[in-house]
Amino acid sequence: MTHVAARFFPLVGVVVGVLLVATGCANGPGPATPTPTPAAPMPTLVASPAPSVAHLTGLEISLEFEPAAERSLEDTQTEWRIGVPTLGKPYLPGRTDGRDTVILPISGGDVTLAATPPRGRVVTDGSPTLSRSGSSISFHDLVVDLDASRITGTVDGRPLDLFDLDLSRAHVEHLPSSPPTIVDVSARASDDAVREVAEHIGPGLTADDLRVDVEMRLKTS
């Protein structure tokens, strides 16, 4: 019995030692160090390109009285036409289509066509004229200011806001084989313009009687 116990206890010691070694290998030499989770990469911010600005080099705008305004012109025997060139001044006369429409050449300007509504300025040449019974008023130096929603010009050399623009439906129309065209622009004569008209050719026309549709066919560089 003594010999059996002597053999048994060393065997137990060996088994316990093996278990301790195995446990140590499983747990490692100390507390496990947590592996940091990589941070998610920050999204790359890409700036949207600014809308390109088109420089205007030509073509034309049309100013056509709306149907109700045309009737007012007829009732008051008022004609909407192109003025006579001034001698000694470079002049692009424009033309009319035989109705109450004048078509003026574009001589410059810059427009952001990608904006809605389009932005910028369209500079024209020529001078549309309202005439009645031998009297007339001519509007020179017309500029379609899309940023300020107005058409400016001069009367007798004095600067004047001629029309207030409605750009709520304005957009650029792209058709095959045609230049970009700004359409669906409506304009109503300003109070100052109505007073000038009354002083030059007589009363009878209101701001609502002087409403025009504006269309701009653009040649860009």
Image (cartoon, rainbow, N blue to C red):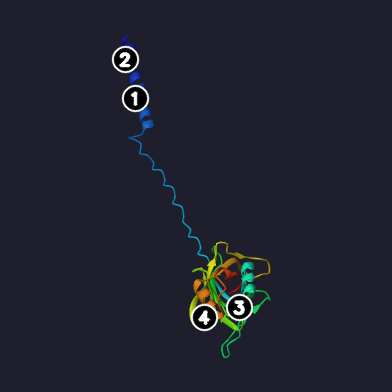
Q: Nearer the viewer, residue 165 or 107?
A: 165
Query: Residue beneath label 3, please?
Result: 105
Query: Residue beneath label 2, please?
Result: 6
Quadrant, the C terminus = bottom right
x then y, percent, for residue 76:
62, 75
- Tell me where residue 14 sits by quadrant: top left
Q: Nearer the viewer, mark 2 or mark 3?
A: 3
Q: Which label was assigned to residue 155?
A: 4
- Tell me where residue 136 sits by quadrant: bottom right
**Label 4–label 1 contact, CB within 8 A:** no
Label 2 sits on a secondary structure element that is helix
Instruction: Give how far apart the Cα atoms at labels 3 and 1 are.
Output: 104 Å
Instruction: Give how far apart the Cα atoms at labels 3 and 4 are.
Output: 19 Å
Q: Nearer the viewer, mark 3 or mark 1?
A: 3
Amino acid type at circle 3 is Pro
Amino acid type at circle 1 is Gly
Q: Nearer the viewer, mark 2 or mark 4?
A: 4
Label 4 sits on a secondary structure element that is strand
Residue at 31% from the left image edge and 14% from the top image edge: 6
Quadrant, the N terminus = top left
The tag earlier along the polypeptide, 3 or 1, is 1
The tag earlier along the polypeptide, 2 or 1, is 2
Instruction: Give how far apart the Cα atoms at labels 2 and 4 are.
Output: 129 Å
Circle 1 packing at 10 Å, graded few (<14), some (14-19), many (20+), is few
Amino acid type at circle 4 is Val
Query: Residue beneath label 1, please?
Result: 17
